[in-house]
Amino acid sequence: MTDRVFPASKPPPTATNGGALPPPPSVNGTSNQKPPQVYIPSNRPAYRPQPYSRHHHHHRSRPSCRRVCCCCCFWSILLLLVLALLASIAATAVYVIYHPRPPLFSVPSLRVGRVNLTTSPDASVSHLSSFFNFTLISVNPNQHLTFSYDRFAVAVKSVKSNEMLANGTVPGFFSGGGNKTSFRSVIATSTSARELDPEEARGLKSDLTRGARVGLVIEMVTKVKMQMGKLKSEGVEIRVTCKVPTVATSKQTKCKSDLSVKVWKWSL
C-alpha cells in the first residue's frame, strides 16, 4: 500500500539574499508589525531649551570693570616704581661723579662796639644796647654746583643764656663753582634800647660779668637755590651757626651749616 503525497498549495517563504523573513500579512490587509517603543523615565525632567539672553552673552564676552581697574592699577604702580628706580639710579650716578658738598662759612674777625645793659634802681626794668661788627666769608667747594642765596637774617646771641644781643642782615648773593665771597663790616646791632624782662636781664648780666670769657653765637638763616647742569632745586632753608669764643676779638671761626645736598629731590 503506497503513501499518498499531497503537494502544498503554496511554498513556504524563504529568505532572499541572506535577509530576514518578511512579516506575515495581517488578516485585514494591515501590517502586524508594532512600532518601536521609546522608554522615558518618569522621574527625568523634560528638556526645555533656555531662551537666548543677550545680556548674559554680553557679560561673558567682555571682562568685568573690576578686573580692568585692577589691571590698570597694577601697571600704573609698576610704571611708577620703574620710574622711581631709574631716577634714583640717575641721582646716585650724578652724586658719585660730581660728589656735591655743602658750602663753607667762616667768621675771621669780630669786633664789639658796645654791649650796654642798664637797669632801673628797683631792678624792674632793664634795657640793652649793643653793636657788633664782623667779617663773613663764604666758599663754594664744588666745581659744577652753584648756590643762589637770598638775604640772610643775622642774630647774635649769648652762648650760655641764649639771649638775643643784636640782629642784622647780609645781602643775598650768587656763588659759582669754586667761588669765594667775603662780606666785611657786617653790622649787627640793637640801635634802640631793647627792654628785657627781669629773668632775661639777670641771665645776660651774669654772662657780661665774665668779661673776655663770654662766648657768642652768630646765627644766620636764609634760603638757597642750587643748580648743577640742568638740574635745579627749589629754595631750601639753610641755617649757619658760628660760635665765637670771646667777646672782644676772635680768630677765624669755622661755621656749621645744616644744608643737605640731596640730588634726588631736584628737577629739570
Image (spheres, rainbow, N blue to C red):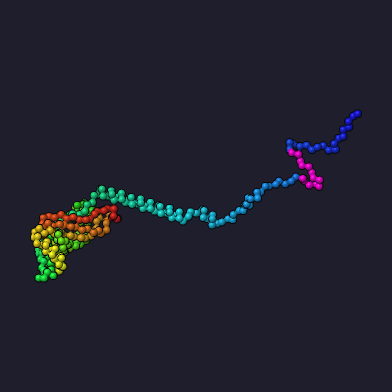
- Residue 85, image x and y in percent? 33, 50
Which quadrant of the view contains residue 2? top right
Question: Does the image show residue 257?
Answer: yes
Q: Residue furthest top?
A: 1
What residue lies at 14% left-to-right and 59% top-to-bottom? 160
Rendered residue at 77%/46% (across/down): 31
**Magenta residue check for 22:** yes
Residue 19 in picture, x, y percent from top left: 73, 38
Q: Is 6 left or right of 30, judged from the image as shown?
A: right
* Whether residue 110 is situated above or below residue 91 in the rendered picture: below
Q: Quadrant of the C terminus?
A: bottom left
Is 234 a magenta residue?
no
| Residue 233 pos. (x, y %) | 27, 56
- Front residue of 202/15: it is 202
Q: Residue 130: x, y in percent?
A: 12, 65
Residue 230 can be seen in this image: no
- What is the number of callouts on the image? 0
Q: Nearer the viewer, residue 222 or 166?
A: 166
Q: Residue furthest front?
A: 122
Q: Residue at x 28, y 49 (%)?
A: 92
Q: Main secondary structure of the magenta part?
A: loop
Q: Quadrant of the N terminus?
A: top right
Q: What span is in magenta?
A: 20-32
The residue sitting at 21% across, 56% down in the picture is 258
25 up-or-down from 62: above or below: above
Q: Is residue 32 left or right of residue 63?
A: right
Q: Nearer the viewer, residue 40 or 10?
A: 40
